[in-house]
Image: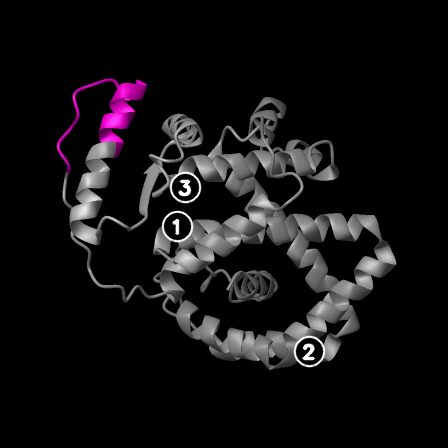
């Protein structure tokens, strides 16, 4: 999906109709082109536990009560998945390491916010002292102090904006290389984009879903293999610089898949993207 979005963004920026019929940003694009057909879930509020959350006795009591609730609903032999923020997650993991016999049926999960911050910190370690973080400062997107905080994973929204913007720029540069080596295919992309857009102003992005379906089908018809061949050729030709930039793009796309899976409840995408992010060399924080 992200490849389709990046392609549409790139073609749209070179089109004269982009001002009247723009392509939404990543969040809006996902909300337009995806549909949630999951059954409506019922949310029940658990009574508040009047005790400091950071104390281990409180955490132990809450885990016992959660186990009783889950056992009554799912059965005694079921696995219990519980999500925490960073501080409580670390405490729960300590309890599980000290008493694996008691907490063997628990699966402690870090919440999306702190998980994304951790991976943004890993991304910052990957690009620190490269031309990417220098470009953020030189282009006046962020100040030097804010850029440093982004690299340390302390600003989720600002870091995602900077990373996604950079990914679009790098994708546009890659598409320029593609337009040179595969001029006929690139011309077909532009023609398809122009045919699908109507005249007039579209402030509700009604064209986005139609454009996404058509562009996805076109890319899957053989363009993706041509693009992969281009990537392999450029990695061999330009060595480490192109490989570095494209590794950065792949890392960001995996992170975006993780965010998408967390928001849309896509469990298998959540697990696969989490596994890939954890296996990334820079995905280590103190």
Q: Residue at x 37, y 32 (%)?
A: 85
285 in relation to 172, above or below: above
Q: Residue at x 67, y 42 (%)?
A: 281
The earlier-in-sequence mark between 2 and 3 is: 3
- Label number found at residue 112: 3
209 in relation to 142, above or below: below
Left or right of 13: which side holds 181? right
Q: Is residue 216 inside the magenta stretch?
A: no
The earlier-in-sequence mark between 1 and 3 is: 3
Q: Is disc 3 placed on a helix, strand or loop? A: helix
Q: Rounded to the nearest whole Å, what is the CA distance between mark 1 and mark 2?
A: 35 Å
Image quadrant where residue 193 sits: bottom right
Q: Which residue is mark 1?
A: 262
Q: Is residue 57 inside the magenta stretch?
A: yes
Left or right of 25: which side holds 3? right
State the extent of the magenta-drawn residues as a range.
46-63
Instruction: Give the number of callouts.
Output: 3
Q: Rounded to the nearest whole Å, what is the CA distance between mark 2 and mark 3?
A: 39 Å
Q: Which residue is mark 2?
A: 185
């Amino acid at each position: 999906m992200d490849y389709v979005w990046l392609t549409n963004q790139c073609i749209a920026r070179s089109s004269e109709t982009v001002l009247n019929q723009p392509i939404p940003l990543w969040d809006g694009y996902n909300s337009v082109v995806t549909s949630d057909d999951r059954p409506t879930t019922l949310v029940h509020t658990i009574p508040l536990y009047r005790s400091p959350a950071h104390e281990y006795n409180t955490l132990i009591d809450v885990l016992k009560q959660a186990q009783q609730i889950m056992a009554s609903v799912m059965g005694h032999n079921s696995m219990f998945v519980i999500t925490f923020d960073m501080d409580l997650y670390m405490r729960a993991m300590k309890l599980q390491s000290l008493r694996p016999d008691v907490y063997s049926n628990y699966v402690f999960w870090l919440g999306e916010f702190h998980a994304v911050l951790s991976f943004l910190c890993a991304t910052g370690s990957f690009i620190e002292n490269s031309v990417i973080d220098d470009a953020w400062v030189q282009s006046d997107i962020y100040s030097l102090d804010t850029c440093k905080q982004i690299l340390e994973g302390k600003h989720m929204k600002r870091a995602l904006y900077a990373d996604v913007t950079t990914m679009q720029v790098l994708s546009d540069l890659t598409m320029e290389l593609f337009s040179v080596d595969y001029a006929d295919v690139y011309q077909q992309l532009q023609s398809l984009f122009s045919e699908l857009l109507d005249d007039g102003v579209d402030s509700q992005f009604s064209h986005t879903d139609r454009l996404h379906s058509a562009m996805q089908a076109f890319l899957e018809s053989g363009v993706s293999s041509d693009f992969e061949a281009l990537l392999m050729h450029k990695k061999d030709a330009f060595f480490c610089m192109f490989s570095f930039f494209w590794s950065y793009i792949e890392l960001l796309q995996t992170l975006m898949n993780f965010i998408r899976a967390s928001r849309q409840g896509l469990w298998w995408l959540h697990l696969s993207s989490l596994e890939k992010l954890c296996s990334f060399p820079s995905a280590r924080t103190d």
